[in-house]
Image (cartoon, rainbow, N blue to C red):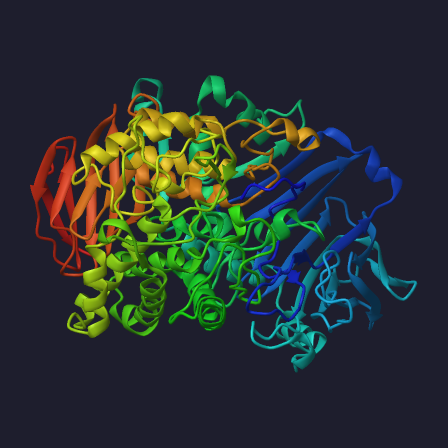
Amino acid sequence: MGRPSTGRTQSPSAMAGSALWFGAVFSPRLSISMVYQLLGDIKLEFDSSHAAYREETYQRVLDLDTATAKVKYSVGEVEFTREHFASNPDQVIVTRISGSKSGSLSFTVFLDCKLHHHSYVKGNNQIIMEGSCPGKRIPPKVNGNDNPKGIQFSAILNLQISDGVGSIHILDDKKLKVEGSDWVVMLLVASSSFDGPFTKPSDSKRDPTSESLRTLNSIKNLSYNVLYTRHLDDYQNLFHRVSLQLSKSSKRVRKNEYLKMKELFSCATSLYVGSSGDESVSTAKRVKSFQTDEDPSLVELLFQYGRYLLISCSRPGTQVANLQGIWNNDIEPAWDGAPHLNINLQMNYWPSLPCNLRECQEPLFDYISSLSVNGSKTAQVNYEANGWVVHQVSDIWAKTSPDRGQAVWALWPMGGAWLCTHLWEHYTYTMDKGFLENKAYPLLEGCALFLLDWLIEGQGGYLETNPSTSPEHTFIAPDGKSASVSYSSTMDMAIIREVFADFVSAAEVLGKSDDDLIERVRKAQARLYPTKIARDGSIMEWAQDFEDPEVHHRHLSHLFGLFPGHTITVEKTPDLCKAADYTLYKRGEDGPGWSTIWKTALWARLRDSGQAYKMVKHLFNLVDPDREGDFEGGLYSNLFTAHPPFQIDANFGFSAAVAEMLVQSTMKELYLLPALPRDKWANGCVKGLKARGGVTVNICWSEGDLDEVGIWPMNQHSIARLHYRGITVAVKLLPGKVYTFNSRLRCVKACPLM
């Protein structure tokens, strides 16, 4: 991502699926992406006394352990409290507002929306808002004579007040006024007419209001405590799988505190906003002071925040996480709030496997399946090729054709291929053969078919791509002019090399190695244009050693083979790793949040803990949203990551990058603390990280040295060798047992898995 735009941040408390997309029809040859938009707002109006709240009492907290946002403040002697959570099992946003004094709560509430809508009161305690998205983008216009029907939507707000205390009145037939209550519970449910990417909005048979009413009727008689308990059970089942605790030095930590860390309990984490006079320190102040205090607990917080965000926005049945995720608050969001496939969408899902959130990937795989359907049409119409293809920008309609605009970002047919690497990765972490056979393999097969047709024979007998770009980057052509289109960019070839290797490996697992297509891929593998080293010792970004007019460019496309790919490794390609090291040095530290995080992961793969931590520290720069144009990268006060403007990808990527610093793996090798900044995180424990081969890993270390590691495999073909700072030990792990190893990697205990 990189075309300039503007945007703002908003509170991280939101409901999955509470934003909408335009509906439109597109040509497979060339089309524009549609826009992700917010549904609306709950507006609360209090009397003037609330504007005179005591500032020293104000607190705003997001508790990551419970996925609950809380606000507290006092007016006179009355303390007012608001609690918000979005329940996945019940598909409702729940808000509870209360006052510490009986009968002290009064306010007016209504629903509002920036799209075409109308609202009305139903009964004496419900507000219904119905509306529609535009059927086409303005600007730019799809077709001057085209006026298609857009997605229809509905939201219903239901109020419950304290028994026998207070009353509800109707205002203007669209507002509800609460007077003299102890507490109010508000339930918000919503639905739309979207019926999948292959059904036009005008053809949808879904009735959003009826669906919303059904959802509401199924839960409106449940108490707040019951709804909260169901929410907690669902959320904590995912969130509590991983815990992380870090400290600078045990000399600064009391012994009993360090022993608690070794117990590997999940830590309670929260984002806090308070008054200057409060004893607690606000999140903004913590971010601002990180450059001097380098507080490891803030790293813990941001790590878990990324996991919380992914749990909150990507669950089975939801849409994929896009550029701003469900936290977009603009009708015209930066870069349309669309899934961008040249780094951003992929980074959104980097933490799902190592950070033990495999279920959160399901929307991505559903999305890839939809892309493959439209992508087969694009492959045929645009390229007369077999298989399926996706370019850089997509949307909820699974757009696969090139986007409008310049070739430097629009002409890049590798988006689908990159996504396919996530399919094989899912298998390597989960060892789910059914997934590999039924979901992953057919998609990999279609992708391989397109890539074989896309490759052409070039000089020296190599198979190459032509035309080819390196995402969003230009070079100086031999005639001295700026250009972006060449042949066989390093990223093109690295992605193809990765997909072919994944496809062949999948075939071996499924007993399909003798298939004719696999044989074609094997022959092509040996002829792929290789990754080359430039005259200055860096990795070449293009097939020729062109002059780079922007050496500090945000993208690191030519290092795909190092991370997230696996074709450049410390063990097997030391010369390319040395060149990758210099490439990162040339690129520098500055860049958008997602670029900072990609650099963190790349340095971690090179086992350079110092440089990896340097990039972690670089991210902790507090961004002022009122002058965000002065910043590059950084964090907003609510820990959202900045391009700027706000983009969610670096939040997810941060969790994955930290995990990469602590654990790296192949199907047979497990590397412990490979990029641990020993002087910065001298002591720590991490519990529940996942490694390839279907392995769960717990690690404790003290004063920068490994103390203890626990491993439990889920498959008999799990890890064969453990590695730690020059020590390599062959192991045989059986499923159903937890193995404990000491600092010398000697197995000291093997217990049945409880």
Q: Nearer the viewer, residue 36 or 266?
A: 36
Give above or below for 3 relative to 132: above
Q: Name the outermost residue toward the front.
A: 479
Quarter of the image that includes the C terminus: bottom left
Q: Nearer the viewer, residue 240 or 727?
A: 727
Please tell me which residue is depicted at 28% across the width and 72% down the height of the picture: 437
Q: In the rendered view, does 147 fall on the left or right side of 584?
A: right
Q: Name the outermost residue toward the right.
A: 172
Give above or below for 132 relative to 501: below
Q: In the rendered view, does 55 fall on the left or right side of 563?
A: right
Question: How many numbered discs?
Answer: 0
Percent x, y of residue 222:
61, 68
Q: In the rendered view, does 425 fall on the left or right side of 385?
A: left
- Picture quadrant where residue 388 is located: bottom left
Q: Nearer the viewer, residue 183 or 726?
A: 726
- Picture quadrant where residue 637 is located: top right
Percent x, y of residue 241:
36, 51
Give above or below for 196 relative to 581: below
Q: In the rendered view, does 20 fall on the left or right side of 110?
A: left
Percent x, y of residue 485:
46, 46
Examine the rendering and report whether any part of residue 66 can be seen. no
Please tell me which residue is depicted at 15% across the width and 44% down the height of the picture: 740
Examine the rendering and report whether any part of residue 516 can be seen. yes
Q: Nearer the viewer, residue 224 or 64?
A: 64
Percent x, y of residue 597:
43, 37
